[in-house]
Image (spheres, helix red, strand yellow):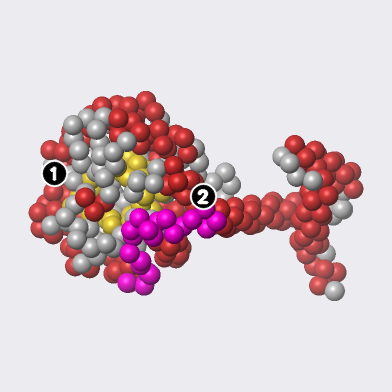
Amino acid sequence: MSILPISQWFSKSTDEPLIIAGPCSAESPEQVMQTARQLAALGRVDVYRAGVWKPRSRPGTFQGAGEPALEWLADAKAETGMMLAVEVATPQHVEAALRCGVDVFWVGARTSSNPFSVDELASAMAGVNIPVLVKNPIHPDLELWIGVIERFAKVGVTRLGGIHRGFSPFQKSMYRNVPKWEVSIDLRSIMPDLPIICDPSHISGKPELIPDVAQKALDLSMDGLMIESHVNPSKALSDAKQQVTPEVLGQMLSSLSYRKITPSTIESIDLLESMREKIDSIDLQLLDLLSQRMEVVRHIGEYKLQNNVAIMQLRRWEEMIKMRIEVGEKLGLSSQYVKDLLRLVHKESIRKQADIISPDDAAE
C-alpha cells in the first residue's frame, strides 16, 4: 500500500502539525466568509473545513445547506487562499465538491461504519487523487477502520490519512466521544506510514476540554488537528456546544506544545510507551464507568429513601458477588482479586446511599 506523508500532500513548508479548522456547518455566505477571514488572519490554519451535508441523528434538525454552500466556500478560498475540506458521503457529493475546487475530503464516522457506502465512495474517487481523511467508525472496530482505508488505497488514493474522533460512549461520559487512544496507537503500529489527525472537538464535546485533548494528540505525535471554529458558536445551527471562536482557537494553538514530527519522533513512542498509553486510556475509562455506577447508586439511594428500604440488601450482595466472580474467572481474573475489588466498590456505594438516606448519621 502506497501512502504519501503529509509533507507531500501540499506545499506546506513547515514541519508543524497540519491544522484544519472551520465551522461545523456552512450556514450562510456571511458566516462562512467571516469565519474564514478571522481564521486566515491567525496565520496558523492550513485548511478551512465546513460541513455542507450534515447527517443528523434525528429528523427536523439542520442538515446542511447543500450544494449552494460549496459556492460560499469557493469564495472564501478565493479571498483567503486557504484550502478547503468538506465531508462527502455519496458519489454525488464527490462530484459537486470537485466542481467547486474542494482540496480535501473527509469521510465521516457514520459513513466509515458502512462498507457499502465506502465502496461507492471509493469507486467515485478512483483517479481523483486528492487527500482523503477517514474518521474512525462510531464504535472501536479497528479492523473496520483499516478496511475503509484499504478500500481507498485499492482505487489508487495515495494521500490518505485517518482522523481520530473518539468513539460513542455506551453511557453518559465526560467526553462526547471516548478517546480510547489505544485504538489509534494500534492503527499506527499496523500502518506506520499513515498520517493520523485528531479531532478534539468531537472527542471533547465542550470547549474547555479541547486544549487537553489536542495536547494529548500532539504528545502522541499525531500529524495534525481538526478543530471546529465559528464566529458566533452560541448561534451555530449544529454542534454549538463544541465550537470555539477563531480568537479562542488562536490562543489555544499558541498555548500548545509542539514537537517536530519525523519518523524518529513517531518511533520514540516505543512498545513500552504505547502500552503505558493504553493503560492510561483504560484507567480513564474505568474511572468514567465508576462515576457512572455511582450515579446509578445515587438514584437507588433516593428510591430507598422514598420507599423506606434498608440500605444493605444481603441477598442482593451475595448474588452479585457470586455472579461477578464467575464472570471474572472466565476473563482470567482471580476470584480473590474480583472479591476485593467489589468490596471496595460496594463499600463506597453503601457510603453514598447512607449520605442520602441518613445524612446526619453519615456525617458522624
Query: Residue at 11% of width from left, 52% of height from top?
Result: 75
* Residue 280 visible, this angle: yes
* Residue 86 visible, this angle: no
| 269 is within the stretch colored magenta | yes
Which of pointers 2 and 1 lies earlier in the amino acid sequence? Answer: 1
Query: Residue at 29% of width from left, 26% of height from top?
Result: 120
Q: Position of residue 42 (x, y in %)?
A: 22, 68
- The amino acid type of the residue labelled 2 equals Glu
Query: Residue at 42% of width from left, 47% of height from top?
Result: 188
> Closer to the camera: disc 2 or disc 1?
2
Quadrant of the rendering where the N terminus is positioned: top left
- Span shown in magenta: 254-274
Query: Residue at 20% of width from left, 38% of height from top?
Result: 129
What residue is pinned by disc 1? 101
Q: Position of residue 250 (x, y in %)?
A: 29, 69
Q: Is residue 337 above or below residue 36?
A: above
What residue is pinned by disc 2? 182
